[in-house]
Image: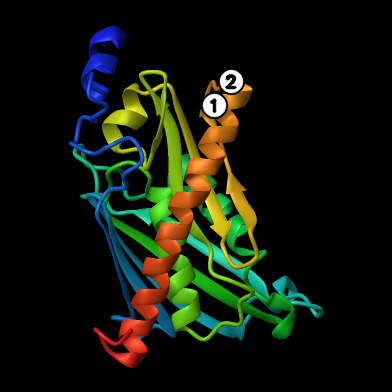
Amino acid sequence: MGGRDATMVLLDENGIRCDGRKVDEPRRIMIRAGGLKNADGSAYIEFGDNKILVGVFGPRDVHPKHMSDTDTGILRVRYHMEPFSVGERKNPAPSRREIEISKVIKEALEPAVMLDKFPRTAVDVFIEVLQADGGTRCAALTAASVALADAGIPMRDMVAAIAAGKVADTVILDVNNEEDQAGQADMPIGYMPSLKKITLLQLDGVLTPEEYKKCVDVGVKGCELVYELQKKALHDKYFGKGDD
């Protein structure tokens, strides 16, 4: 792919991106708490063209028993992409990428969940990506936090997530699929806004120290915006829509 042409299309001379957004503008985000009657907690998110459903079960007994911890509960996360979630049909077997993202989301959620409140048990988080469009790990992490809260799992804070990045030498917020493929850097960030703590920070690409700091700042501001939508989703479920 001709890198120069792709870069020119990704960001025009007016600072408008390939999907019509400004550099600091996220895609459309819709979060709904609940929806799965057989899960203890659930959430659905549309983040751009990502569509992701999350079900939470637990705390419940660990099987086999030797996997349990007498001092704390354990968190188990499975991130799974449906075969029809991408343009070219995906093999339904778990890929290395899905296993890696499951681990990343688990580690990003662990600082938020008060696992010591329920020793010898497990909380299971099942993430189903129905449609993928760049930034699925951030969208999935955001929805998983809402589903955990919906399940009544004790949490220090919810984790809100979004990716910052670099396109045409410019720092941007909420990297879409085209920008992820042809851009210069992608930085997924997970953040607990009430505690002001980052729980996920990855970087694919190269940034100068100044760009790195700006990416973190832009990403944290984006997470704070996502956090308001997470809280609204829970408020709408339990107190009804339109009541501020």
Q: Nearer the viewer, residue 50 or 76?
A: 50
Left or right of residue 210, residue 92 in this image: left
Q: Is residue 226 above or below residue 236?
A: above
Q: Are marks 1 and 2 in contact (CB under 8 Å)?
A: yes
Q: Residue furthest bottom?
A: 239
Left or right of residue 47, residue 56 in this image: right
Q: Does the image show residue 37? A: no
The quadrant where residue 173 appears: top left
In which quadrant will I find the N terminus?
Answer: top left
Residue bearing the label numbered 2? 208
Label 2: which secondary element: loop
Distance Cα–Cα, label 1 vs label 2? 5 Å
Q: Residues within 10 Å of mark 2 (few under 14, many from 20)?
A: few
Place of residue 60 in the rendered image (x, y in percent of width and height, measured from the top left): 58, 85
Could you tell me which residue is drawn at 36 percent across and 40 percent down?
Answer: 24
- Residue 211 is labelled as 1
Could you tell me which residue is drawn at 28 percent across and 89 percent down?
Answer: 240
Could you tell me which residue is drawn at 22 percent across and 24 percent down?
Answer: 14
Place of residue 200 in the rendered image (x, y in percent of width and height, measured from the top left): 59, 49
Q: Residue furthest right?
A: 71
